[in-house]
Amino acid sequence: MVDDMRFNYSDLNPDLIMDALDLSGLRLDSGLIELNSYENRVYQFQDEDRRRYVVKFYRPGRWSRAQILEEHEFATRLWDAEIPVAAPLAFAGETLLEHEGYPFAIWQSVGGRQFEVDNLDQLEWVGRFLGRIHQIGACRPFHHRVRLDVESMLHEPRQLLASGEWLPSGLAKQFFGVLDELIKHVSDAMTLDVAQISLHGDCHPGNILWRDGPMFVDLDDCRTGPAIQDLWMMLSGERHEQQIQLDTLLAGYEEFMEFDSRELALIEPLRAMRIVHYIAWLARRWEDPAFPRHFPWFNTDHYWRQQIAILHDQLEALKAPPLTLMPNW
């Protein structure tokens, strides 16, 4: 399915949303509360039995039906294995519904407080469940979801940025100069031959709620890739702090899944890929009115100078020795 850069959600009004929810048989007993999501449109509501739900309208053209259903199937397998993950509800046997060209799905609303990434007890708990998620993800590969690779995360974003007019002309040469050097370093690093498994794909702390333990949400970016992709975003701070966090995370992880220490060399390349992909994501979505409204700084000189500095810093991180496992590993 082709991702239409010109698409926006201007037709997704409250009447259309309520008509769509009627297809599921749910009846609203409250207003729609828009939740923080730019790629899709997500709303919380309460039905006539005072049960809370979340409905997500997928951006048409971003994923194919087969890709969305594979996301749902993965979440359901994890839930059936008693892993705390938000899995979509089925209505008449279907988890993916559609109305007026908008594919959508419904989840029970799961509350919780913010996961404390600097809390080592919580971090080890998250590591245990990530080990279980990967244990299941390694058993059945994705057939339709995308692969985490240099082409989609670096080369395609570079081509998109070069073809548009987002960069100030005086900064383009400097930006693409450091970007091309970064792409070369990352491309060399990503030739490492490690296992490719089914992943959460976007496992940052904001996608983990805490409610008597971790609850993993938003598998919208689940994909095939190395296990470290679901681990590195838990690491923050100075190198010695990241070392302690990594040790704690893997203490829980390896109770269920063996970790290939060679993947530590992929942390900074994966971070670089995420940085560049995010810049291109803003450019790709700029025709959606929500983006200029929420990211007004995107097309300013200050923003692009800042990105050049960030890419330079990331290039230095790529040249530095990777994190290593603690002696007890």
Image (tube, helix red, strand yellow):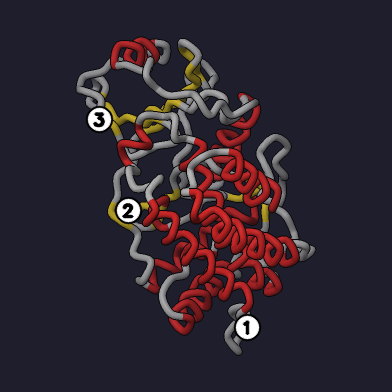
Residue 26 visible from this viewpoint: no
Q: Is residue 252 above or below residue 306?
A: below
Residue lying furthest bottom in this view?
327
Say which label, 2 or 1, has the lower sequence index.
2
Q: Look at mark 2 in the image and give the residue it sits on.
A: 211
The quarter of the image holding the N terminus is: top right
The total of numbered circles placed on residues is: 3
Q: Are marks 2 and 1 in contact (CB under 8 Å)?
A: no
What residue is drawn where x is 69% and y is 51%?
149
Say which label, 3 or 2, has the lower sequence index.
3
Amino acid of disc 3: Ile
- Point out residue 26 in the picture as x, y percentages from the top left corner: 34, 16
Which of the two residues, 256 or 233, is positioned nearer the viewer here?
233
What residue is drawn where x is 29% and y is 16%?
14
Left or right of 197 in this view: 15: left
- Give the numbered dot on residue 33: 3
State the image quarter where residue 324 is shown: bottom right
Residue 167 visible from this viewpoint: yes
Indicate which label's residue lies in the foreground, 3 or 2.
3
* Distance between mark 2 and mark 1 Cα atoms: 30 Å
What residue is drawn where x is 48% and y is 23%?
7
Amino acid of disc 2: Arg
What residue is drawn where x is 46% and y is 49%?
168
Q: At numbered mark 3, what does the secondary structure look like: helix, strand or loop? A: strand
Residue lying furthest front in this view?
170
Q: Look at mark 1 in the image and give the residue it sits on.
A: 329
Q: Is residue 9 above or below residue 256?
A: above
- Point out residue 285 in the picture as x, y percentages from the top left corner: 47, 35
- Point out residue 229 in the picture as x, y percentages from the top left corner: 59, 59
